[in-house]
Amino acid sequence: MSMIIAKRINENGQIDIQKLRDKYPKFCVQDVDLLIFINRIFNEKYDVIRALKITIEAPVVAENIGFSTYYRLNLFNVMAKYGIPKDYYIEVVASNFISKDKTQTIMIPIFPNEIILDCDYGIEEIIRKEVENIRKISETYEIIGKLYHIGLMEIADDLRDGIVRSERGDIDGSIKFFRKVIEGFESWVNEDVVGSSNRVEALKKYLKKAYHLLSNFGEHAGTRASMKEGILSKEITISIAKYLLAKMEE
């Protein structure tokens, strides 16, 4: 599912990710990004001073000091944008490595089906109390990585856009992308995935109706969707994705 990292941020806007590097030495390298959800910012007394709840891609940086190389996550842009001081703590949920070249983007899920903690001393117990809430976030982002792995990159990108817009409060925009995900699944689903032609037909009918329902929410219908409609759209889309991925893993 992910690694929850809660670390003190240094003067360069970086946090230590050596534990992640030790577990993924081939992927956690310079010029690879992490897909992360930034949850909370804590001051030096471990008080929550801000709940950002945003998703970004942040680069891994390697620094050579003497004969050793140290791996950190560069969050300087976040530090600058939100005025986060040196020595405050930042809590992130790292869900996927993102490797890009001129022709493709590859997403590699981090700790599938597990949640691993990497927290500085003193803040770990605070983070542990919130693990179950964070688990729900982790499950959602793990789906994106799995979709990439089975070749559904466009659907994965649309799902990610929908989730990010939902986090930012752009309900109409999120529904637009959730609708695209459902449309993509309707075109893709086949007997090899779900096991029988009858089930394919029934599932396609369900997806068509789900698409029609979401088309009556938000900007597509020339109206504004409510938060309840945004939540419903997200839950329908995530549940469909989880079911299809589970069938693929049988």
Image: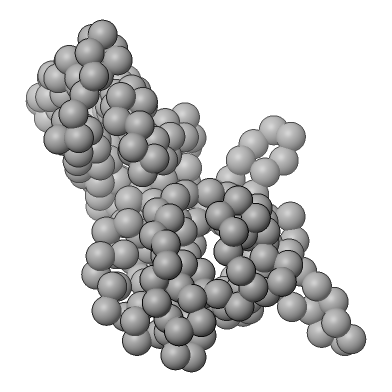
Near-viewer residue (143 or 151): 143
Report the residue at 39% width, 40% height from top.
168
Q: Nearer the viewer, residue 65 or 23?
A: 65
Taking 101 as reference, is 81 above or below it?
below
For the image shown, how many numbered marks are present on the structure?
0
Residue 2 vs 185, above or below: the answer is below
Q: Residue at x 46, y 59 (%)?
A: 38
> Most extreme residue toward the top, as rendered?
222
Image location of residue 137, percent across then percent down:
32, 56
Q: Is residue 224 among what the camera can see?
A: yes
> Which quarter of the figure has residue 211?
top left
Q: What residue is rendered at 77% in x and 69% in y?
A: 62
Q: Is residue 123 above or below residue 165?
A: below
Identify the coloring: one colour
Task: Work out whether residue 171 or residue 242 is closer to the camera in this orientation and state it.
Answer: 171
The single residue placed furthest to the bottom in the displayed view is 121
Give x and y (percent) for residue 199: 12, 30
Occupied quadrant, residue 221 = top left
Q: Name the spot of residue 183 as percent of width and height, x first.
A: 30, 21
- Compared across the picture, whether 159 is left or right of 193 comes to right
Left or right: where does residue 219 sit relative to residue 118?
left
Residue 26 in view (yes/no): no
Q: Which image quarter holds the N terminus?
A: bottom left
Q: Is residue 30 above or below residue 15?
A: above
Identity of the residue furthest to the right in this view: 66
Q: Position of residue 149 (x, y in %)?
A: 47, 46
The residue at 42%/81% (across/down) is 46
Q: Quick check: 237 left or right of 158?
A: left
